[in-house]
Amino acid sequence: MYIGDFLVNIQKYTIKNSSFEPKHIFECGQCFRWNKQDDGSYIGVFGNNVMSVKKENNTIVFKGICEENIQKVCEDYFDLNRNYEEIKDKLSNVDEFLKTSIEYGYGIRILNQNLWECIISFIISANNNIPRIKKIIERISCKYGKKIVFEGKDYYTFPTPEQLSNATVQDLRELGLGFRDVRVYNTTKMILEKQVDLHRLEELNDSEKIREELLKLDGVGPKVADCIMLFSTLKRLDVFPIDVWVRRVMNELYIKAEDETKVNKKEISKIAVEKYKNLAGIAQQYLFYWRQSRGA
């Protein structure tokens, strides 16, 4: 198997963890580069890694091409050193609604995704649906990323800022970005010029200051900023992204307004902070996954 010009061995790693369900993790809206296979496994690309994840009885099997030791890669990306059993116990005591959503999405873990990739991915996600988002990101990666061959198939890494800077606005438009093309182009330029310094962001501990910096980027509004803060290596578990589904579930459970579209997001955020405190982001994922699964 090759990555670039180097022969790389496939590595394997297994764990037993009751708070790890591939379907819950990869289909809860936090990531866009994992796809279910015919055998029930999921294959995804993150960083310079291509990995297959499959649950066999009570064992999670990780297999893939990794730039570092696969155990370390998995521990970092899948947040394996965080005690989700303890978190679920704590959140289950908030109320019966949250307890029910946790029982439904018991295997959710919030991934530590690359900050740069997360920024561009969630800019692309604005006013978009998941199948289309995934296709756009795949096209960007195929054109500007690096090829990795895994089990006879070609996969492509997400391009670095330097690689993506080779794309013009027109190039991005031809990849199907629509109105997001200019935003992705401008944000790439801003990051390369360090108008927003990603390394500095990862060193900050204040969620408000991080949000202020992210909001400087073209295409990043409050919801996208919160998604980036929660789903990337920034790992701000206190933020509570509010989309259509989260507004709907919070209204149904707590606010009970006749017209949910008129519910103030500040009111939702206030309830989330009061109820879920510094675990609001994890609570949001359980609620989102539970409510979305029931559809409109």
Image (spheres, rainbow, N blue to C red):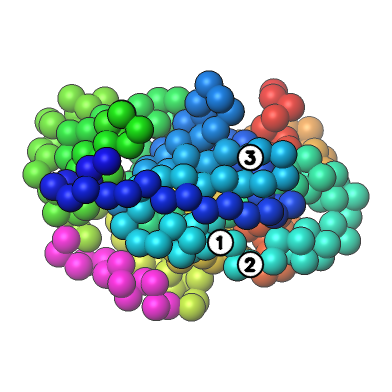
Query: Residue 241 appears at what percent x and percent y?
Result: 57, 51
Q: Secondary structure at mark 2?
A: loop
Tell me which amino acid carries mark 1. Asp
Q: Is residue 177 above or below residue 263?
A: above
Quadrant location of the C terminus? top right
Query: Where residue 283 sits: x, y (%)?
Result: 70, 54
In the rendered image, which quarter is residue 271 located in? bottom right
Look at 42% across and 40% down and name the residue there: 44
Judge by depth and name the residue closer to the eye, 26 or 42. 42
Q: Are marks 2 and 1 in contact (CB under 8 Å)?
A: yes
Judge whether residue 199 is colored magenta.
yes
| Alpha-carbon span between mark 3 and mark 2 | 19 Å
Name the residue beneath numbered marker 3: 55
Q: Can you tell which mark lies on residue 82?
A: 2
Q: Amino acid at mark 2?
A: Arg
The secondary structure type at the circle numbered 1 is loop
Q: Is residue 44 above or below residue 76?
A: above
In the image: residue 292, left or right of residue 204: right
The residue pinned by badge 1 equals 79
Say which element carries label 3. Answer: strand
Mark 1 or mark 3, earlier in chain: 3
The residues bearing labels 1 and 3 have C-alpha atoms spaced at a distance of 17 Å
Residue range (magenta): 192-204
Tag in front: 3 or 2: 3
Residue 101 shown left or right of residue 132 in the figure: right
3D distance between C-alphas at marks 2 and 1: 6 Å
